């Protein structure tokens, strides 16, 4: 089964796996988030091949969102179980019961459930089946939302999350491989997978991009996806440089438990972009530390603080919990 995977494809996968080599040495378990679709079945195939030589335990996890029909869910599980029986893997089936069924809500609940499984299985690595196509789609969606540079970096190959005091590593090891390459290999090896019918509905923005807009862009430029990936890499380099610069300025800020003080004279000398980025990161630290809910979003709060800088008032309430004040020397953001 695994001998027919082209070396150039497998090498891309291995390069991503190497990014968590130290963690794998300590804990030889990887959770594979599987849906029965081609991407997750291919992820499972590559992880299985890797496990044969490296004595790694692969734990496939399927999450029933209760969004699709029982018939479709049954087909998903059957496809995954067929693979698991051939490879002696044990499938774990979990459920979530979303009140809202939008993409963001489902994603949040799905990751929370995967984190819970990771804790139970005593592992800290979760592998997902995001592909090169997903990276390009996310770039366009973030562009349409008016995202900043960080959003235009699209999906990171590796992300760290904190859950109940532990660090969870979300790895995307097939992020450099295209959907077309994946489907071709699965077909050659006669590995079953399912197709989610909702992926064909253009009611969802991602599906509209995938099924209508991308084919038109392909007519303009056959290599448009590779060109977008190249652009994303440039944004990542820019974002890394900006992050380094911002961290230097954050060191100068006095970040305490319930407030942050920023030298006002120095801050006013920053260009507008740097002001916004510093404020965004300061707010992120406060909000995450105290688990505050920011309904209006960071962008509006940052804009409110910038406007406040040039007004006569010395105090402004930003949210129910956040207040900003200024003196001749300090700009102070505090929980109140």
Image (tube, grey):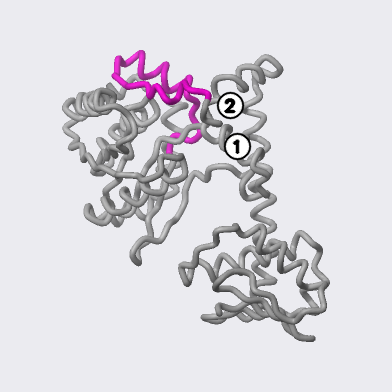
> If the image is split into quadrants, where does the C terminus sit?
bottom right
Marked residue nearer the N-terminal end (1 or 2): 1
Instruction: Say which residue appears at 39% left-offset and 40% top-offset.
Output: 128
Magenta highlight range: 173-202
Residue 244 position, x and y percent, is 66, 62
Instruction: Say which residue appears at 65% left-offset and 63% top-offset.
Output: 301
Q: Which residue is mark 1?
A: 141
Q: Quadrant of residue 254?
A: bottom right
Q: CA distance from mark 1 to mark 2?
A: 9 Å
Q: Quadrant of residue 100?
A: top left
Can residue 128 be seen in this snapshot? yes
Residue 29 position, x and y percent, is 27, 48
Can residue 50 be found in the magenta stretch? Answer: no
- Judging from the image, what secondary structure is the residue with disc 2 in? helix
Instruction: Say which residue appears at 55% left-offset and 73% top-offset.
Output: 321
Does the CB distance between marks 1 and 2 fall below 8 Å? yes
Residue 205 position, x and y percent, is 56, 31
Disc 1 packing (10 Å; few <14; some 14–19; many ≥20): some
Can residue 55 be seen in this snapshot? no
Instruction: Say which residue appears at 75% left-offset and 81% top-offset.
Output: 314
Residue nearest the observer in this picture, 66 or 124? 66
Residue 285 position, x and y percent, is 55, 68
Residue nearest the observer in this picture, 332 or 100? 100
Q: Relative to 213, is 335 above or below?
A: below
Number of labels in the image equals: 2
Q: Relative to 102, is 178 above or below?
A: above
Q: Which residue is mark 2?
A: 209
Disc 2 packing (10 Å; few <14; some 14–19; many ≥20): some
Residue nearest the observer in this picture, 173 or 207? 207
Can residue 192 be found in the magenta stretch? Answer: yes
């Amino acid at each position: 089964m695994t001998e027919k995977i082209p070396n150039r494809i497998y090498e891309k996968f291995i390069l991503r796996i190497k990014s968590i080599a130290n963690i794998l040495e300590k804990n030889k378990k990887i959770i594979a988030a599987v849906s029965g679709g081609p991407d997750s079945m291919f992820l499972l195939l590559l992880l299985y091949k890797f496990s044969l030589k490296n004595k790694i335990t692969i734990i496939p996890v399927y999450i029933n969102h209760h969004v699709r029909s029982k018939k479709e869910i049954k087909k998903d599980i059957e496809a995954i179980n067929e693979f698991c029986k051939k490879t002696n893997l044990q499938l774990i089936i979990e459920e979530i019961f979303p009140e809202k069924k939008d993409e963001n809500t489902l994603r949040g609940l799905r990751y929370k459930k995967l984190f819970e499984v990771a804790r139970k299985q005593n592992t800290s690595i979760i592998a997902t089946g995001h592909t090169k196509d997903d990276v390009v789609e996310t770039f366009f969606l973030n562009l349409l939302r008016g995202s900043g540079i960080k959003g235009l970096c699209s999906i990171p190959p590796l992300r760290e999350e904190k859950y109940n005091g532990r660090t969870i590593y979300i790895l995307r090891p097939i992020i450099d491989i295209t959907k077309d390459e994946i489907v071709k290999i699965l077909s050659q090896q006669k590995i079953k997978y399912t197709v989610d019918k909702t992926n064909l509905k253009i009611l969802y923005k991602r599906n509209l991009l995938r099924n209508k807009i991308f084919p038109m862009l392909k007519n303009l430029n056959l290599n448009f996806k590779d060109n977008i990936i190249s652009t994303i890499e440039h944004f990542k380099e820019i974002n890394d440089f900006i992050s380094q610069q911002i961290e230097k300025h954050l060191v100068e800020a006095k970040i305490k438990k319930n407030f942050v003080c920023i030298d006002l004279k120095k801050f006013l000398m920053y260009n507008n972009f740097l002001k916004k980025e510093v404020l965004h990161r300061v707010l992120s630290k406060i909000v995450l530390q105290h688990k505050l809910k920011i309904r209006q979003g960071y962008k509006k709060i940052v804009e409110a603080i910038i406007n406040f800088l040039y007004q006569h008032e010395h105090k402004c309430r930003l949210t129910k919990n956040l207040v900003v004040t200024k003196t001749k020397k300090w700009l102070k953001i505090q929980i109140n």
